Structure formats: C-alpha cells, structure tokens
Image (cartoon, helix red, strand yellow):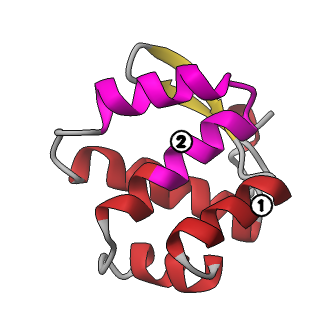
Amino acid sequence: MADLTTFFGDGEHTFKLTSAAVRELEAKCGPVGALSNRVFSRNFAQADLCETIRLALIGGGTAPKRAHELIAAYVDGRPLIETYELAAKILERALFGTPHGDQASAS
C-alpha cells in the first residue's frame, strides 16, 4: 500500500494504511470498501476521518501516543472539511497506490 508524506498539524508526516491498520480500521468503522465509498461520496462519519488519519499516522511510523496527540490537537473539534481531503487521499493511496506523476510525495 502506497504511503503519503504531507504537512499535517505541526509538520510533515508520513501516512500509510498497512494491512494491520486496515484490519483495525475495519473493526472500528466497517469494511474498508464501504468506508471508502462513504468518504469518497462525502457521506462519512467523523470516526471515518479520525480513525483513517490516526491509523495511517501509526502505519507511517508515528508512535501511537503521538498519533493520538496529533488527532486531539488537529482533528478533534476542527471543521470536518479540514481533514476530509487528507483522509480521502490516504484511502485513495491504500486502494489505488501512488498516482502517476505524483512520485515526489510518495515514499
């Protein structure tokens, strides 16, 4: 599954939904295909965005405690649209890999 490195909250972070992260995401939010459909159609729940970002941070190498702190600081209580695009990009990378011509932001 392709990773994504981009600015989030306080700096550059790497996001990757590993197989283990997808299993945990599915346990919390339902099948990843259904979750992706909800996000891509903008018919998502707040947990869909938060858990996608949190688990992708962990999959990208962020310690679980730090990932929780980042979610608390930069996702919880913020307008959903601020994190919607990030969650959608994470899911897009997990499902389809790195888009052609976007090699610079992928690790």
Range of magenta residues? 51-75
List x then y, in percent, for residue 36: 53, 76
**How many numbered marks are there?**
2
Return the residue at label 2.
Answer: 54
Residue at 57%, 23% (x, y): give it. 65
- Residue 44 drawn at (x, y percent): 33, 74
Residue at the image position 38 percent from the left and 22 percent from the top: 9
Amino acid beneath label 1? Gly
Amino acid at pointer 2: Arg
Q: In this view, does 18 lie to the left or right of 76?
A: right
For discs 1 and 2, the disc positioned in front in the rendered view: 2
Residue 27 is situated, as x and y percent measured from the top left of the image, at 63, 70
Query: What type of secondary structure mainly makes up the magenta span?
Result: helix
Q: In the image, 6: left or right of 23?
A: left
Please check the rendered image and state whether residue 62 is part of the magenta-colored stretch, yes or no: yes
Spatial CA span between label 1 and label 2: 19 Å
Task: Please say if 20 is above or below 92.
Answer: above
Q: Where is residue 39? Give x, y as percent.
A: 41, 72
In which quadrant is the C terminus drawn? top right
Task: Give the position of the N terminus as an image quadrant.
Answer: bottom right
Q: Does dot 1 land on a helix, a strand or a loop?
A: loop
Give the residue at mark 1. 97
Snapshot quadrant of residue 43:
bottom left
Label whose residue precedes the other's in the sequence (1 or 2): 2
Mark 2 secondary-structure assignment: helix
Any part of residue 1 in sight: no
